[in-house]
Amino acid sequence: MIIYEILKMGDERLLRMAQPVTEFDTDELHLLVSSMFDTMRSVDGAGLAAPQIGVDLQLVIFGTDAPNPRYPDAPLVPRTVLLNPVITPLGADEESAWEGCLSVPGLRGLVPRFSRIRYTGFDQYGDPIDRTVDGFHARVVQHECDHLIGKLYPMRIRDLTQFGFTEVLFPGQEALADD
């Protein structure tokens, strides 16, 4: 098991454009994916993008088979490996909700995201993925894929009065070490 260090906001590597994955179903890719899931689980993350661990590839993972302690009321999102993703908004409707990020510890912000999206790409074997989703699932995908274009969620916040420390915004709610 490999647990990667998660890069924090301010690290210039988080601002780069990730490169497309060109080789699928390799031992190196499978080890990377497995280690990313181990890393995500170790910090109760909802998702993780390769750039967050300093790997410059268009690769995100998200979802679990059990409720997430960081988002206990959120519906389950299927465990997914998504490479070279393309997101297409399905309509102009947006929803704003509180987000955190493993790369922005201790903070939360109210972030607008498209309500309903279609995402396509490939799994680690090179098999195509094509899903239409909404709600929390759509939010997680958009959040993780933003990392592939050098965006962190604070860059999407429209009202900075809705951005701050978790312990201040949500008194009594204990922030996790990586929240």
Image (spheres, rainbow, N blue to C red):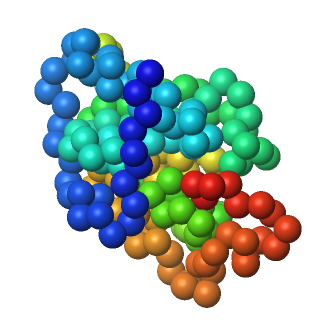
The residue shown at (62%, 55%) is 177
x, y percentage for residue 51?
A: 30, 47
Q: Residue furthest right?
A: 172
x, y percentage for residue 85?
A: 32, 38
The residue shown at (85%, 68%) is 172
Foreground pick, 55 / 83:
55
Does 140 sit above or below residue 177?
above
Foreground pick, 7 / 156:
7
x, y percentage for residue 49?
A: 38, 43
The residue shown at (58%, 69%) is 107
Q: For the N terminus, give its image quadrant.
A: top left
The residue shown at (21%, 44%) is 56
Q: For the C terminus, give its image quadrant.
A: bottom right
Q: Is residue 2 left or right of residue 77?
A: left
Foreground pick, 93 / 27:
27
Q: Residue furthest bottom?
A: 161
Does 36 sit above or below residue 144?
above
x, y percentage for residue 82?
A: 38, 31
Foreground pick, 125 / 121:
125
Does 104 sit above or below residue 58?
below
Q: What is the tally of numbered marks visible in this picture?
A: 0
| Res 133 seen here | no
| Res 155 seen here | yes
